[in-house]
Every structure is written in C-alpha cells, then in structure tokens.
Image (tube, rainbow, N blue to C red):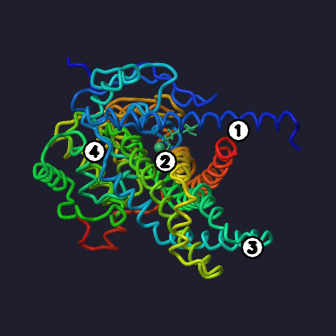
Amino acid sequence: MAEPVITVDALTTHYGAQCVLRDINLAVAEGEILVIMGGSGSGKSTLLYHLLGLLEPTEGAIRILGMDINRCSNRELEDVRRHTGVAFQGGALFSSLSVGDNIRLPLEEHTGLDRSTIDIMVRMKLEVVELAGREHLMPSQLSGGMVKRAALARAVVMDPRLLFCDEPSAGLDPVVAAGIDDLILKLREALGMSIVVVTHELESAFKIADRIVVLDQGAILASGSPAELRAHPSDKLQRLFNRQPEIPDFDADAYLHRLMGDAVP
Amino acid sequence: MATLVDRLEIIGRRTVSGVAEVGLAGALLADTLFWLVVGPWRRQPVRLGAAVQQMAEVGVYALPIVTVLGLTIGVMLAIQGIYTLRNFGAESHVVVGIALSMTREFGPLITAVLVAGRSGSALAARLATMRINQEVDALRVMGIDPVRYLVAPPLLGLLVMLPALTVFTDGVGLLGAGLYVDNELGMGLVPYAQRLKDVLKVDDVLHGVGKSVIFALLIALIGVVNGAGVTGGAEGVGRVTTRSVVQAISAIVITDMLFAFAVTR
Ligand SMILES: Nc1ncnc2c1ncn2[C@@H]1O[C@H](COP(=O)(O)OP(=O)(O)OP(=O)(O)O)[C@@H](O)[C@H]1O
Ligand SMILES: [Mg+2]
C-alpha cells in the first residue's frame, strides 16, 4: 500500500501544565476524507494547527506528504505547503482583496503563469464553488456561506493533494451547511484530493467522512468508519453524542419549508 | 494586597516580555532585510507595488495636516524667539534660533509624532485584525512569508516617506516663521531667506533627516510587534493600537533626547 498522506505518531502537546493533546495516532490515506470530531475545547483546532505546522508538538512526530514537518528544512516545508490547501473557520479571506484576487493570490505568488491563464483557472474554481460572476465582490459583501465557498475555492486553487477544512459548516443554517458538505464531496470527486475536516456537527461528519476520529479532552476516544461508529458506539461515545445540544420537538426542515416554501432545494 | 515578592515577580515578567519584544523587533528587521535582498532570487520579491501604496498612505495623504502643523510650529517658534530675544534687544538674531530648532528638532519630532499617530497605529490595527481573522495563518500555510508580504512594504514606505515628509515640514515651518518674522520685524522674505542660507548648514538638515530614519524604524517595528502580539478579539485590536501609538511616541521623544545629548551637546 502507498504511504499515507498524513501520519501522526504519538503526538502529545502541553500548554503550560495543561495537556491539550494526548498520545494522538492517526493516518490519512490518499483520497480519503477524515473527519476530526469532538465537543468544544476537545482539542480539534489545536490538532489541526499541528497538522498545518503552525504549532509544534511537545512530543511525537507528524509526517505530511512524506515529510516530517517539524524537522524538515524551511524549503521542504514550503514544498509541502504548496501541495496543501486550507479553508479556515472564519474563511480568513484577505479583507483588502476582492474575492477574485483572494483566489488568485496563491497562483500569483507561486507560479509564473501569465494573467490570462490565471484568470481562467480562477474562473474554473469559482464555477466549482458556485460563485461564478462574484469575483469582484469584497469579502465584507459576502454572506457566511459565500465566505466559506470562497475560502474553499482559494484553498484548492493550486490543485492541492491535501485539503484541510476547519468547521466548514459551522454557523450556517442547515440548508447552506448541507450545500457545503456536498461541495466538499464534489471537490474530492473532481480533484481527487485527501481531505481533513474538523467539525463538531455530528450530522455532517457522518455524511462526508470515510473515517471519523472522535476527540475528547485531547485524546482519541474512538475512531473508525461512520458505519463502525454507529454499530459499536461505546458508552463514552454515546454520552458524548448525547451531550450535543438538541432542541426538543423542533423539526428544522419542516420549519424551513413552512418559512420558505418551494425555495428550499 | 500584593506582597513585595508578587510585585517583583510582575516587574520581572514585564521586563522579560519587554526584552522579548525588543528581540522580536530585531528579528523582524533582519527578516525584512533578508527578503529585500534574497526575495528576488527566490522569485518571492517584496511587493514594490504595496510599498508604493504605503508611501502614498504615509506620505502623500499626510501632506495637508503636515502643512498645517509645520506652519503652526514655525509661527510658534518665531513668536517665542522674538519674545525671548527682545529682552536682550537682539530680535534680529531670531532667524538662527528658528532655523536650527526647526531643522534639528521640531521638524523631525513633529512629523514623526504625527506619522506615529496616523500610520503606526494603522499598521498595528491592520496586522492585529489580520491575525485575529487568521489571515496571517492563511498566508503562512500558503507558503507566503508574512514578513515579506505584510511587514516589508510598510517598513519601506515609512523609511522613504518619513525623511521626505520631515524635509517638507522643515520647509513649511521655516516659511511660516518667515511670514511671521516679516510681519513682526518688517524683515522681508528675501532677506529672511538670505539669512537662512547663511546660518543653516546642510549638516543641520541631515541631522534631522537622519533622526527621522530612526524614527521611521521605531514606528514601523513598534507597530508590527504590537499588531503581531494581539490577543483577544476586537477589544485586543483597540488595545494594541493604542499601545503602539503610546510606545512609538515615547520611543521617539526619548530617542530624540538621547540624540540631542550625544550629538548636539
Ligand atoms: N493558546 C492557548 N493557550 C492555552 N490553552 C489553549 C490555547 N489554545 C487552546 N487552549 C486550550 O486547549 C484546549 C483545546 O482547545 P481547542 O481550541 O483546540 O478546542 P476545539 O476542539 O477547537 O474547540 P472549539 O470547538 O470550541 O473550537 C482547550 O482547553 C483550550 O482552553
Ligand atoms: Mg476550534
């Protein structure tokens, strides 16, 4: 079997005295979608920042695309980053640049392509995320869902082998959130990349994941395919799922249909 | 009540973080120089377009207010000078005092204080906002060095424009003083200019301009260090912005005094 695109080996990290990540081991295969799930404060973002090489672990090793990102040279890390795309939680679009210029930026910085070629590539990615014709808008003029789409377009504009998404559907209404989930699946199909998604949304995790890793208080509580997790939920896992806030007697879909009628896709 | 030991510990910690900030400023400066020299070779040049835009921002747009302040300071120096010298019946010597204090002290000082308030604060606020919106993280994972992309252009802008503005302030200040002197002593602008030419040495102007280069470094580095060190949300942005202005103005005034002590005395 080919080497996994991500290998995390015995990763442990402390913030001062607090242990925020404890003995994390995981691997992501080529073309796989891994979902990192867990409640608030379970260490999801911290783990993601380690995978991005933005935080250094206290112990353990992380290999991304065959490179130990904490021990390789800056040049090698840069090389890894050119094959990696990241969609941050808030989008992290550059507020002084238009949507089009945001998406164009990695191409302009890293390739010697001429303007018209770059324009074509940007337009293609805008089509994929269904933002065609919106490239002139500024980030402040976008809705929450559009920000996430633009961030995804920027993340994949270099056709990365590996895509990271932090809470891609958090803070969106259920219809738009489902659209983002579909978009992630579409990106994998169209561009064949491996994807790591961080989320606390149970439903979207089970929808898009090939494999799920559940974090609790910095440690892996359970991992496996959605089917495996459904079939063998341990007591602790059950409790964690039940901890997700539920609104009793509230059918969001029915409510939306009543509100918006046929406009709901 | 805090014990003496507690207080000593707080002072100790602040000292350590203060030294760390100075170290960070030095590292930033070294990094900027590195990218200026090495960037083009690596096909990652410092963005000159952005630097030019910063120059307009720092220099050109500040012209109206600098003009007003320069004229005012000039008139003020003339009033004070004439008032002081009248006691000795030596009003006609007022030009020497005006020329030297304007070019050696007030021109550089007033311009730097103004630019610290206008541009240093803007730099700190911009970087802080970008940090909080994860835009700086986004740059790093794109393999775009934040120092090259975000720090070098405003640093260049300040290094070019503050000295230029200082010369401009000197000019309008001397003009303002001349107008007042002409009005008060009936000297005539041409003899005033002639007198200026006699008493003012190139060294005096260069002394001021040299200081303004150092002031520019102080404003830029203090702005960047504060912006990069932001914690908390929008409130944090406000805090570091204020802090950067207060620190920059203090640093400018103290440096100016040290200069006067070392060179003018
Ligand atoms: N810079 C930091 N310094 C100290 N502790 C931190 C820091 N960042 C995070 N933590 C702690 O690490 C733990 C994990 O935080 P993290 O942000 O990774 O959680 P999360 O799973 O992403 O939560 P959320 O869903 O709310 O974003 C928390 O207990 C948090 O308090
Ligand atoms: Mg988080």
Looking at the rendering, in which quadrant would you find the N terminus of chain A? top left
Residue nearest the observer in this picture, B122 or A141: B122
Mark-to-mark CA distance, 2 and 3: 78 Å
Mark-to-mark CA distance, 1 and 2: 42 Å
Eye-nearest disc, 3 or 4: 3
Please report contact status of discs 2 and 3: CB closer than 8 Å, yes or no.
no
The residue lying at 27 percent from left, 36 percent from top is B40
Residue type, mark 2 in image: Gln
Q: Which residue is mark 3?
A: B83
Mark-to-mark CA distance, 2 and 4: 29 Å
Eye-nearest disc, 2 or 3: 3
Q: Which residue is mark 2?
A: A244
Eye-nearest disc, 1 or 3: 3
Crowd class of label 4 (few under 14; some 14 to 19; many from 20; radius 10 Å): many
Residue type, mark 4 in image: Ala
Residue type, mark 1 in image: Arg
The image position of residue B7, as x and y in percent, is 82, 38
Eye-nearest disc, 2 or 4: 4
Residue A41, relative to residue A58: is it above or below?
A: below
Mark 2 secondary-structure assignment: loop
Viewer can see residue B258? yes
Same chain for the residues under marks 3 and 4 in the image: no
Residue A243, relative to residue A233: is it above or below?
A: below
State which chain disc 1 sits on. Answer: B
Q: Which residue is mark 4?
A: A155
> Which quadrant of the view contains residue B111?
bottom right
